Image (cartoon, rainbow, N blue to C red):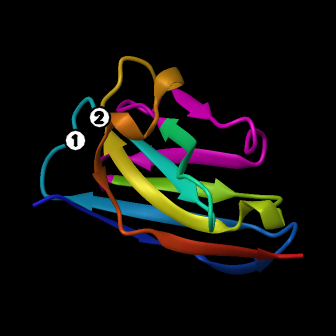
Amino acid sequence: QVQLVESGGGLVQAGGSLRLSCAASGRTFSRYFMAWFRQAPGKEREFVAAISWSGGSTNYADSVKGRFAISRDNAKNTVYLQMNSLKPEDTAVYYCAVGRAITLRVVDSSHVDYWGQGTQVTVSS
């Protein structure tokens, strides 16, 4: 049974930083991308960042480019999201995701095979 367990969410002031982690288990994830999505209250779930199996390719939503960095450790089946210069509009539940896509440029919810349970990130102004 595949499990994705997120950690690292919390409350932070605007301008601060948080690091999210997601540990995957239950199968091997060779050739799968790992990604983060987020969903704010009253809004649809949106793509944040993705990283290829090798870690050699990444893609980011325009809203987080230059502030967030995604990385992965395949030995630990873990993906990370370093979030810097946080803004109140980054407030959302953040979800870890694992899936397959021809290219990271087209990743959206339809490419996801497995989801984590979500972790809350709240940025105060």
**Relative to residue 83, is residue 34 depicted above or below?**
above
Mark 1 is on which residue type? Phe
Residue 29: mark: 1
**Callout 2 secondary element:** loop
**Residue 106, x across and y down, in percent:** 49, 23
For disc 2, the neighbor class at 10 Å (few under 14, some 14 to 19, many from 20) is some
**Residue 75, x across and y down, in percent:** 29, 50
Residue 67: mark: none
**Relative to residue 90, is residue 99 depicted above or below?**
above
Residue 32: mark: 2
Name the side, left or right, on which 29 lies relative to 124: left
Mark 2 is on which residue type? Tyr
Residue found farthest to the front: 42
Examine the rendering and report whether any part of residue 95 can be seen.
Answer: yes
Instruction: Tell me the distance, in whole angstroms, between the alpha carbons under discs 1 and 2.
Output: 5 Å
Q: Quadrant of the N terminus?
A: bottom left
**Residue 79, x across and y down, in percent:** 43, 52
Residue at x-position 83% and y-position 59%:
85
Please say whether residue 57 is one of the residues in the magenta stretch: yes
Residue at x-position 78% and y-position 61%:
89
Name the side, left or right, on which 80 lies relative to 68: left
Magenta span covers which residues?
51-77
Examine the rendering and report whether any part of residue 86 can be seen.
Answer: no
Residue found farthest to the bottom: 11
Please say whether residue 110 is one of the residues in the magenta stretch: no
Magenta-drawn stretch, dominant element (helix, strand or loop):
loop
**Residue 120, x across and y down, in percent:** 56, 75
Circles 1 and 2, Cβ within 8 Å, touching? The answer is yes
For disc 1, the neighbor class at 10 Å (few under 14, some 14 to 19, many from 20) is some
